[in-house]
Amino acid sequence: MLEGLDGLAAGDRHRGWDFVRVLTAAFGRPVVEGDGADPALVRVGEDQIGFVLPAALREAYLQFGGRRDLTAVQDFLVPPQSLAIAADGVLVFRVEAQNCARWGVSGQDSGQDDPPVLVNDGDGWVPYSDRLSLALVEMVMSEAMFSADQRDVDHRELDETTNALVCAAYEPLPLPVFPFWAGMDGPGVRWFAGPDVLLRNDGETWLWVHGRTPEAVQAVRERLPGEWLMVADDDEDEEWGASHRIVV
C-alpha cells in the first residue's frame, strides 16, 4: 500500500501518481482511464491565467481531476477552468470547505514543474510544502478518507498519551509535516500507516483513521482505546459511482 512514497519523498513526482493509483486500488476505488479532467478545460484554465500550469498540477488534473471523492469532499481542488491568480500574485488551486484557507503557488514559481506550495489561513501566505506533488498526494489521501464509507473511518481527540502511542505503534509515512491550517502556530499534520490503515494526526490534537476494512479500523480502536466518534451501521452503505465524478 505504501509503494511509491519513497520515490516521491526523494523528488520523483511520478512515483507520487503511482502511489495514488496503488492507494485508491487498495481502498477499492481505483483511478482508471477517464477519471481526469477534460484536457480542453485544462487549456481553458491556462488561457485564463496566461501561462502553462506547473507540470505536477497539470498531471494531477489529467489523471484524477474528475474524481470528486479524491479532490472535493471536504476541501476542493479548483476546477481547471476556474483557476485564477489572486491579487497578491498567487495561483490558487485548492480552497478549504468554508473558505478558511487557500493553497497556491507563487506566480514567480509557476514555471517550475513541481514548485513549492503556500497556504493562507487569512493571515497571509506561508510555506506549506516544498513540492506541489507532495501537497496533491496529501490532498488525495485526505479527501479519500473523508469520502470513505462510515464503517471504514473513525476519529477522536488526541491526548498526550494516545499521541505517544500513535508515534510508537504506527509507521510514519515519508512525507513532510504539513502545516495545520487550523492551528498554524502549533504542531502540523503527520501521516502514519499500520496493517490496512492510514492515520492522520492533526496538530497532535485530533486523530483520523481510514481503513481498508471495518475490521482494520476496529483493530486501531482496540489498540488506542478511547472515545471514538463513529458508530458502524451495517444497514448503511454509501453509494459510489456517478457521485464520484465532477461534472465539468
Image (cartoon, helix red, strand yellow):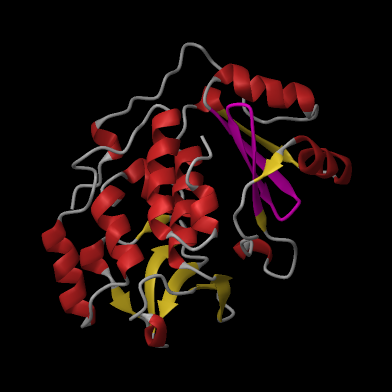
Q: Could you say where residue 93 lies in the image, as x and y percent from the top left? A: 37, 67
Front residue of this view, candidates 48 and 57: 57
Q: Could you say where residue 152 lies in the image, as x and y percent from the top left? A: 54, 26
Most frequent secondary structure within the magenta stretch:
strand
Camera sees residue 109: yes
Relative horizontal placement of residue 43, taking residue 232 as reference (left or right)? left
Give yes or no for residue 110 being in the magenta stretch.
no
Relative horizontal placement of residue 87, taking residue 150 as reference (left or right)? left
Q: Residue at x 61, y 22 (%)?
A: 216
Q: Residue at x 75, y 42 (%)?
A: 157
Report the residue that reaches farthest toward the right. 161
Front residue of this view, candidates 157 and 195: 195
Total number of numbered discs in the rendering:
0
Q: Quadrant of residue 27?
A: top left
Front residue of this view, candidates 111 and 47: 111
Q: Quadrant of residue 179?
A: bottom right
Q: Residue at x 68, y 64 (%)?
A: 183
- Seen in the picture, residue 143 relative to 237 is either above or below; the reply is below
Q: Residue at x 24, y 43 (%)?
A: 35
Q: Could you say where residue 234 lies in the image, as x and y percent from the top left? A: 51, 12
Give yes or no for residue 195 being in the magenta stretch.
yes
Report the residue that reaches farthest toward the top. 235
- Seen in the picture, residue 119 relative to 201 is either above or below; the reply is below
Relative horizontal placement of residue 134, taking residue 112 as reference (left or right)? right
Q: Could you say where residue 63 lies in the image, as x and y percent from the top left? A: 27, 50
- Seen in the picture, residue 90 relative to 138 is either above or below; the reply is below
Camera sees residue 72: no
Q: Quadrant of residue 151?
A: top right
Q: Which residues are magenta?
A: 190-211
